[in-house]
Image (spheres, rainbow, N blue to C red):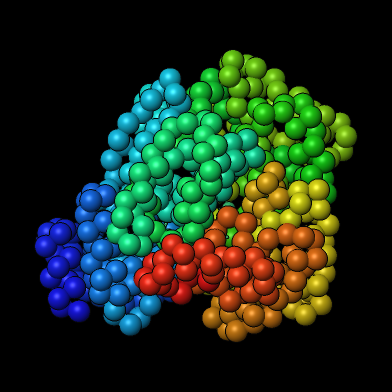
Amino acid sequence: MKDVLERIAAVVGSAGLVTDETGMAPHMKDWRGRYSGRPLAVVRPASTRAVAEVVKICAETRTAIVPQGGNTGLQGGGITDASGTQILLSTGRMNRVRAVDALNNTITVEAGCVLEHVQRAAEDAGRLFPLSLGAEGSATLGGNLSTNAGGTGVLRYGNTRDLALGLEVVLASGEVWDGLRGLRKDNTGYDLKHLFIGAEGTLGVITAAVMKLYPLPAARLTAIAAVGSPHDALRLLSIAQRQSGDALTGFEMISDFCITLLVKHFPATRTPFDARHPQYVLMEISDARSEASARAAIESILAEGMEAGIARDAVVAQSLSQVNAMWAMREDITEAQRLEGLNVKHDVSVPISRIAEFMDATEAALRRAYPDVRLVVFGHLGDGNLHYNVCGPQGVAPEVFLREEAGVTRIVHDSVARFNGSISAEHGLGQLRREEIRRYKSALELDLMRKLKAALDPLGIMNPGKVL
Ligand code: FAD
Ligand code: 2HG
Ligand code: ZN
């Protein structure tokens, strides 16, 4: 092992090799505090060439590699095991924007670039990089690609996969695949980039990518509407899509218990309305022409919703600070839950048309077994993706309720399966869902996945114990 570290040190230098406890600590535990590991070392290469050399050494010595970006993943995919034999490869020093081609509407970025910086670089060039999620201040583009992250703009712009045009990847052999093409059309055989997107570091290390950009909208307006049920939230979605089509760039749902948690953990939170309501919808309209046009569009949606008796109350943000406050109400739920203590998380999707029915059926099934659980349900309604998180009954310590995790998850995921849904919509499998997926994916699909893994990583050194 000492020999491996000496060889790696010769490639990355002292700035690129961390072996002391304090330096490794931020990389050893996941964001939720649910998984912890002990790496042999944290290796921080600063270039694709250095990543390739490190991977070659690991292949020769059969040393496992766990890639890590911003360490905001929620499934434990970027954490090593506790053996002290795996290398944690952090992409933090590979954070350059290599190029922006405004006319081609593309940006070429290194994997360790923080998502917020990518958004800013696009904006500086008068363009929009539309991937947006609560962890964007720390999550990296490499992590986004490797988890095929979703977020709040999927309704209009798609998942990370839909935004990627080309990749550069260091393969498990240490060879570099240069697929950094910025083409909208390229049908020259298998589209290899899609193998690495969503692979959670199990097939290779993504070192750079060419991503799509879009025109910056002239205005983005946000509103919150209160509704009586998920069924009404769906009706409002239908109105919004009929009236605004592609201008509808966000449609999120927040259940009332989320607001209770926010108020408890962020006392400065201002509830959107004087009265409380069962569900809230956060809606965003982006308009290419003007703010007046965006305002007219959002007000017209809300007016129709109110007239139809669907929206019980509604408010359109009047200033940037109100926009930020509305989005904070949505984005801070995960942090409020963390402060409340470990809970049972589920990141599920079902066909959008069936999401309200799914919520009714799942809650009924859950309450039969666990009558007093508190549901922290929120998410990307416009994509059919819910964070169906379950807290224990009032007064039961989180770590005590966590003993029920397997039973709770079985009920939720079996319900997802009955609705032809997915048990991981946007967070990946990591360690958390590695076993669980065997119950819900067909043997044929799992076998194909294993064959791909064996073909691309025959030595099994890339992020072992994750996904498969
Ligand atoms: P990490 O956590 O470091 O790694 C995630 C996985 O990718 C691991 O398996 C790791 O091995 C692999 N990996 C990382 N970099 C590379 C690379 N260069 N090459 C190969 N493999 C790599 N996710 C959503 O989809 N939508 C959301 O709305 C959302 N909101 C969030 C809000 C909060 C508050 C938090 C904490 C998380 C949220 N997430 C969300 C989850 C998380 O932010 C995303 O999964 C994000 O894409 C992870 O990026 P990262 O750089 O932190 O990756
Ligand atoms: C979000 O949409 C994230 O905010 C996190 O995907 C979801 O905390 C969660 O369960
Ligand atoms: Zn989400």
Observer-nearest residue: 251 or 118?
Answer: 118
- Where residue 57 sits: x, y (%)? 23, 67
- Where residue 142 sits: x, y (%)? 40, 50
Taking the spot 12% from the left edge, 59% from the top edge, the residue there is 13
Please give left or right for residue 450 compared with residue 28 in the image. right
Q: Compared to 55, does 272 lie above or below?
A: above
From this viewpoint, is residue 191 visible? yes
Q: Compared to 200, does 153 lie above or below?
A: above
Taking the spot 22% from the left edge, 74% from the top edge, the residue there is 21
Q: Compared to 118, does 287 lie above or below?
A: above
Please give left or right for residue 397 compared with residue 117 in the image. right
- Where residue 447 sits: x, y (%)? 60, 70
The residue at the far right in this view is 308
> Which quarter holds ligand 2?
bottom right
Observer-nearest residue: 356 or 173?
Answer: 173
The residue at the far front in this view is 189
Please give left or right for residue 262 compared with residue 380 in the image. left
- Where residue 445 sits: x, y (%)? 64, 65
Residue 123 placement: quadrant: top left
Taking the spot 81% from the left edge, 77% from the top edge, the residue there is 368
Taking the spot 65% from the left edge, 27% from the top edge, the residue there is 247
Quadrant housing the N terminus: bottom left
From this viewpoint, is residue 23 visible? no
Observer-nearest residue: 173 or 345?
Answer: 173
